[in-house]
Image: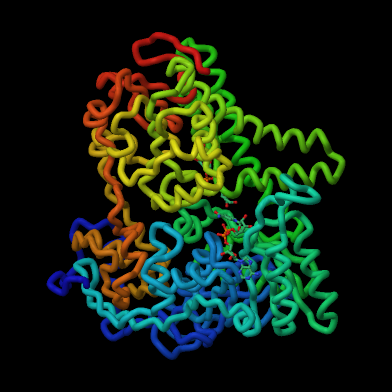
Amino acid sequence: MANPNHSQGPCPAAPSTDRELAHSLPSSQSIASTVSPGTSTPHSWSAGTDWALRSTDPSPLSGGTASPDFELHRLFNGNNPPPAQKAPGSPSRAAAKNICFIGAGFVGGPTAAVIAHHNPHLHVHVVDLNTSRIAAWNSPHLPIHETGLLKIVRIARDGTLDTTVSLPGLARPVELKAREPNLVFSTGVEEAVAEADVVFICVNTPTKTGGLGAGAMADVSAVEGAVRTVTRHARAGTVVVEKSTVPCGTAKMVRDILRHHRPEAEFEVLSNPEFLAEGTAVENLTHPDRILIGSAQTPSGLRAAAMLKDIYAAWVPPGKIVTVNTFSSELAKLVANAMLAQRISSINAVSAMCEEIGLGADVDDVSLAVGKDERLGPKFLQAGVGFGGSCFEKDILNLAYLARELHLDAVAEYWVSILKINEDQRRRFARRVVRELNGSLRGKKIAVLGFAFKDETNDTRNSIAVHIVRDLALELPKEIALFDPGCEVEEIVEEVQSSELSSAEMERVKVCSGWRECLQGSSAVCILTQWKQFRGRQLGASGGAARQTIKLGGHQLDPATNDVCLSETSIADLEKLSWRELSSQSDDPLGRLKPLPPCPADCSGCRLGQWDARGRDMEAVDWVEAADMMEEPRWVFDGRNVVNQAELQELGFKVRGIGKGFNCCGATWRGG
Ligand SMILES: NC(=O)c1ccc[n+]([C@@H]2O[C@H](COP(=O)([O-])OP(=O)(O)OC[C@H]3O[C@@H](n4cnc5c(N)ncnc54)[C@H](O)[C@@H]3O)[C@@H](O)[C@H]2O)c1
Ligand SMILES: O=c1ccn([C@@H]2O[C@H](COP(=O)(O)OP(=O)(O)O[C@H]3O[C@H](CO)[C@@H](O)[C@H](O)[C@H]3O)[C@@H](O)[C@H]2O)c(=O)[nH]1
């Protein structure tokens, strides 16, 4: 809870936005941070006030929302709502009240939670056939480990408490009214669909493994399953939103199925692909680069798009919401992933060249130089052992399949070449390990640090590590020890077991629960995931978290009235102020969260620990200690260029990074 002893006057050293906030609260206002589910009221300044909505977006699609401009208008003009301003002929549709998400996976769960968090007036119901997944969403131990996710789930799922905030930067205490719960997780798929105004389909769409298009085409059977439920149970007029990544033309297919089974009912089908990346899901959902909405370009399609746009406009600036037709939207999702992966394959191809040139060419220097070109930019130019994960490969295969279907073989080959480079990159890495260890791994222990497909996640699906472990296991080493600071031992075991290793190869694989156990007695360490813990204690310690600059939502402060309106975004600003002014370490500095119910004594979630407060080994590797544990000569094969090569070489390690055509002493070497 915020400290009442600091409630007098503004902080003299505070920047201007802080000073504005310091005078921001009138003496007698009480602030409701939410309204009851089912009312059309957005975040209200004072409870019980109903606001007319105004479009702040010149686009004819906008149906209006509680945008910052609207909130400012309200503050300048008291409680008189601004006149509704709709572009002539612009479509309108009743605002959604009940939303259903089918699929409580990596996309459905976090997306539903963020939508519910920012739209307290909506009732959001997330359903899945997987009972254990739903049980986890209803527990203190969520099935998905994403920074900040538990907190927003708790706010929306459990509601919040009445609280009063007193901070040195605030003129007077701020009263935050309790929030009602508006996020439900259940297995009641049919009931949730029957109640919904909008149904988001967030089910899995993996690459087909058999039959027509095996190994290339996306398997949309789960989408079809979800659509079947909609045809049977949805009310006429329900808007169906395709959130899953699907082949181009799927929205039309869904529309056709609905028309066939329910010819009397009007259904609109929208494409609204998701661009979040795992490990940064909450950040990506909270501050998206864009929200893409594809709709039929008919009046009713545009009305449906406007309704969806309003849901996002609760926290996304209107300029970031892009509306197109459904085909362009579906294609854009596949192309975005293909182009991101293409950059990685491009820089990995360069890394192979750097290694072969061997004259000191360093791929990281090339990335730096190339990324300075504003037309190219610095992101997604990190060379490594290749990209993994559940999305890039399947979406490129999907795109290439479409090109082939269109008889564009050269185009299909172009996309497939991205995957060929990726495969070559990981093969080259495994070959190099074997070559440097004199062409044989027999009798040697190989340590693998990192098993998740990227850092800050526990997702091991299609991880590069699985492929490399398989290639190394073929060499019959004494042992391959695996450790990942973000994954449970069971998660890694499960993934390895599904990797087609023979029983003789499997016997050599051991999953460890700490880096010491993993490195003990090894001849070589392969770093396959970019966890910062692998950089080492020395670097980890010197890094020190930079002090965060607090943006106090300046555009939401009214300089004339010094009022502040408290949407969840503004409450987040208050939390930042609290962290700064009171040096609070609490995840809940305003004291809004309801306590979690105690877990049963045999709770497996408690036993395994949690992402945010877990018992697993998140300690940085101490390379000084590691040097003593390993067999000589000690090799480090850094597949993500995370360690400081010079520092490790001083400790007696032989280090090989990606795309380094030299070692630190200037001697050239050649990759495998
Ligand atoms: N994972 C990501 O980072 C990411 C990002 C953007 C887009 N996508 C796309 O989003 C979609 C979902 O991906 P995900 O990673 O969330 O998948 P996931 O496997 O984690 O979750 C899908 C969930 O859908 C459930 N499901 C399947 N059929 C169902 C039905 N008929 N009724 C109720 N529940 C059902 C499954 O039980 C599962 O829990 C995919 O198309 C994927 O390509 C994923
Ligand atoms: O410069 C880079 C960036 C990433 N990677 C690797 O690429 C893979 C994918 O990383 P990332 O894209 O960050 O994670 P994903 O969760 O797979 O997200 C991608 O796939 C999602 C599913 O479609 C999209 O929504 C996201 O926009 C898109 O980034 C990982 O193995 C990374 O290690 C690199 O090797 N070099």
Task: Identify which residue is drawn at 52% across, 69% down.
Answer: 112
**Percent coordinates x, y for residue 617 in the rendering:** 29, 47
Front residue of this view, candidates 426 and 563: 426
Q: Residue at x 87, y 41 (%)?
A: 407
Horizontal arrangement in the rendering, residue 13 relative to residue 16 (left or right): left
| For residue 469, side relative to residue 333 (left or right) | left
Position of 26 compared to 467: left or right?
left
Q: Residue furthest left?
A: 5
Residue at 57 percent across and 35 percent down: it is: 344
Instruction: Please tell me which residue is depicted at 23% across the width and 39% down the height of the picture.
Output: 541
**x, y (%) of residue 475?**
50, 26
Q: Quadrant of ligand 1?
A: bottom right
Residue 90 seen: no
Q: Viewer-proximal residue, 95 or 621?
A: 621
Percent from the top left, x then y, of residue 6?
A: 15, 69
Left/right placement of residue 347 relative to residue 628 reads right
Residue 623 placed where, x, y %? 26, 30
Quarter of the image holding residue 580?
Answer: bottom left
* The N terminus lies in quadrant: bottom left
Up the image or down, 492 lies above or below 537; here it is below
| Residue 201 visible, this orientation | yes
